Image (cartoon, helix red, strand yellow):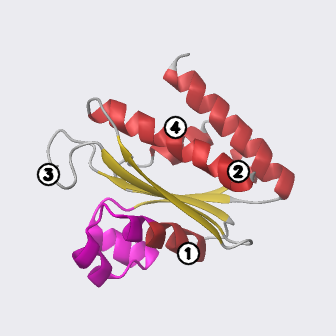
């Protein structure tokens, strides 16, 4: 199946699940640069279930827009479980959404370290009414585009899992 078709199908399923519950979604994205929000808003009528997106590529943006403590970023690194969770919670706190997904990673080709190689991506999902939180670390293979597309798919799949 072509990736665009797969992402569209995931976003359509997510839209139906959110609409059925009367919920809104938001995204907090770093390495995907708004790709999850793009996939969601490709769906006609997504304004019924999609609230807004935060593209927080810099550490300063994560702090300013989402309330992620600068000390947390300094201590854990932007690509960490703690920061992804803070981004997900911050996205809900700074929006009208009940469901958020946050992504922070190293898409490459540079920027990797022995502890966090290129392809390391942390995702977090937060469902506000139930205070349901989950996170996941991925080590993805491929070039920059492939890492980003895989992360977008996992983000959408995780949103569906949060709602199930």
* Lower position in the chain sequence, tag 4 or tag 2: 2
Q: Are marks 1 and 3 in contact (CB under 8 Å)?
A: no
Q: Mark 4 or mark 2: which is in front?
A: 4
SS at mark 4?
helix
Q: Mark 1 or mark 4: which is in front?
A: 4
Q: Which residue is mark 1?
A: 94
Q: Spatial distance from mark 1 to mark 4, Cα to Cα?
A: 24 Å
**Which mark identifies residue 53?**
none
Nearest the camera: 109 or 115?
115
Quarter residue 9 falls in: top right
Question: Is residue 111 at all visible to an observer of this figure?
Answer: yes
* Lower position in the chain sequence, tag 1 or tag 3: 1
Q: Which residue is mark 2?
A: 47
Q: Which residue is mark 4?
A: 153
Quarter residue 76 falls in: bottom left
Q: Are marks 4 and 2 in contact (CB under 8 Å)?
A: no
Check disc 2: other Cα within 10 Å, few if <14, some if 14-19, many if 20+: some
Which portion, as a residue range, is magenta? 56-84
Check disc 1: other Cα within 10 Å, few if <14, some if 14-19, many if 20+: some
Q: Which residue is painted at 79% across and 43% down in the image?
A: 16
SS at mark 3?
loop
Location of residue 29 in the rendering, given as x and y in whole percent from the top left corner? 43, 55
SS at mark 2?
helix
Q: Which residue is painted at 67% across and 73% down in the image?
A: 131
Q: Mark 1 or mark 2: which is in front?
A: 1
Q: Which residue is painted at 57% across and 31% down in the image?
A: 7
Nearest the camera: 39 or 149?
149
- Predominant secondary structure in magenta? helix
Q: Residue furthest right?
A: 20
Q: Residue furthest front?
A: 115
């Amino acid at each position: 199946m072509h990736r665009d078709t797969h992402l569209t199908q995931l976003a359509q399923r997510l839209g139906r699940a959110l609409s059925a519950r009367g919920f809104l979604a938001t995204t907090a994205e770093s390495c995907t640069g708004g790709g999850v929000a793009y996939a969601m808003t490709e769906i006609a009528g997504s304004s019924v279930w999609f609230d807004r997106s935060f593209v927080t590529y810099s550490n300063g943006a994560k702090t300013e827009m989402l309330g992620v403590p600068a000390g947390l970023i300094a201590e854990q690194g932007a690509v960490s479980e703690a920061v992804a969770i803070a981004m997900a919670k911050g996205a809900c706190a700074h929006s009208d959404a009940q469901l958020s997904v946050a992504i922070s990673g190293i898409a490459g080709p540079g920027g990797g370290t022995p502890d966090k190689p290129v392809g390391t991506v942390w995702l977090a999902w937060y469902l506000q009414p139930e205070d349901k939180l989950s996170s996941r670390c991925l080590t993805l293979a491929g070039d920059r585009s492939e890492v980003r597309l895989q992360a977008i798919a996992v983000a959408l799949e995780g949103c569906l899992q949060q709602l199930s």
